[in-house]
Image (cartoon, rainbow, N blue to C red):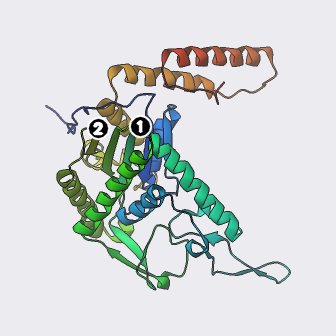
Amino acid sequence: MDFFTKINIPAADWQIDYNSKLAFFGSCFADNISTQFASRKFNVLANPFGTVYNPLSAAMQIKAIANGKKFGETDVFQDTRLGVSENGNEIRGPWHCWDAHSSLSAATREECIAKLNETTANAREFLQKADTVFITLGTAFVYFLRENGVAVSNCHRQDPRMFIRKMISVDHAAEALKSIVRDLLKIKCDGIGENRELHIVFTVSPLRHLSDGAHENTLSKATLQLAIEKVTREIVTEPATTISYFPSYEIVMDELRDYRFYDDDMIHLSKTAEGYIFERMAETYCNEKTREDIRKVEKFMKMANHRVVDSQSPASREFAQKIIEQAETLEKEITGLHLNNEK
């Protein structure tokens, strides 16, 4: 008898290897999976503007990159929540951007704008050379500024009365995803002389947003699934471009339907579950040669991350030399692998 439901995922017609440049946009699940690739030394760009959960915000971030947007004074605002120092003086808050995570906030307006523009330029340069982009959607609920109806990626803990929160329709979500596809293709076309091959993979985060309510979370995830299905069916691309769906949500719901695969909060996934999903992705997008390369890198990284107690001892020096030698050997064996940090 078979007591395990395994999701059938056909191998992709294209491949990821150590020459690939992989970009990830989306929810914290995108952060987690990109970390799985990065820890195995793939070339990865992950959420340059910070974690983003809904389709509209992801589309706005990618459009800013595609258009080479120059952020200015109107794109940032100062935190309205004022504090008081020990000597009684008023403390002004940091500067934020509605489209970006607080990691791009800064103490001054000029510094915040500089961070945003540097991030945009670096992300654009990477995406012009990227061959695979993963878009992970977390929710169909979106926060809109009450004063102008603009969607925000991050509320920055501002007064809740500033926002209207609602679940967008399937068509609204699908239009945002189509915008993402068009803008990613625009970025590739602007990269004169670069590889035109581009694979866009949509996926839905299996992490439940139970604060919305169990039923509302189900409706939200279903909205995202239907929007992705609409886009993959309706958009016709050139042969060098593919648009597809990877069933992360289904893997967790069907294959990992046990709370032992969850973290202590019973919502986020455990490291074991994240590692398993990475394995299913490797089976889908990597050939046997690349999967063997991954195993070699995993073994090397386990050794390279070994804690050294006394770095000046002869044994530690010998160990360090061994790491350098193995790193150089792996770099010769695996085209595209770079272990400069480890060396």
Q: CA distance from mark 1 to mark 2?
A: 30 Å
**Residue at figure coordinates x 57%, y 66% from the top left:** 71
Q: Residues within 10 Å of mark 2 (few under 14, many from 20)?
A: few
Mark 1 or 2, which is nearer the eye?
Answer: 2
Q: Image quadrant of residue 81?
A: bottom right
Residue at which label 2 appears: 240
| Farthest front residue in view | 192
Give amino acid for label 2.
Answer: Ala
Q: Is residue 106 visible?
A: no
Residue 171 versus residue 342 in the image, above or below:
below
Residue at the farthest left position: 1
> Circle 1 sits on which residue?
275
Task: Check disc 1 and report its element: helix, strand or loop.
Answer: helix
Viewer-side residue, 196 vs 268? 196
**Residue type at numbered disc 1:** Gly
Q: Residue at x 61, y 55 (%)?
A: 118
Is residue 91 shown above or below 172? below
In the picture shown, does residue 239 fall above or below 82? above
Residue at horizontal 42%, vertical 56%? 27
Query: Can the viewer see residue 115 in this picture?
Result: yes
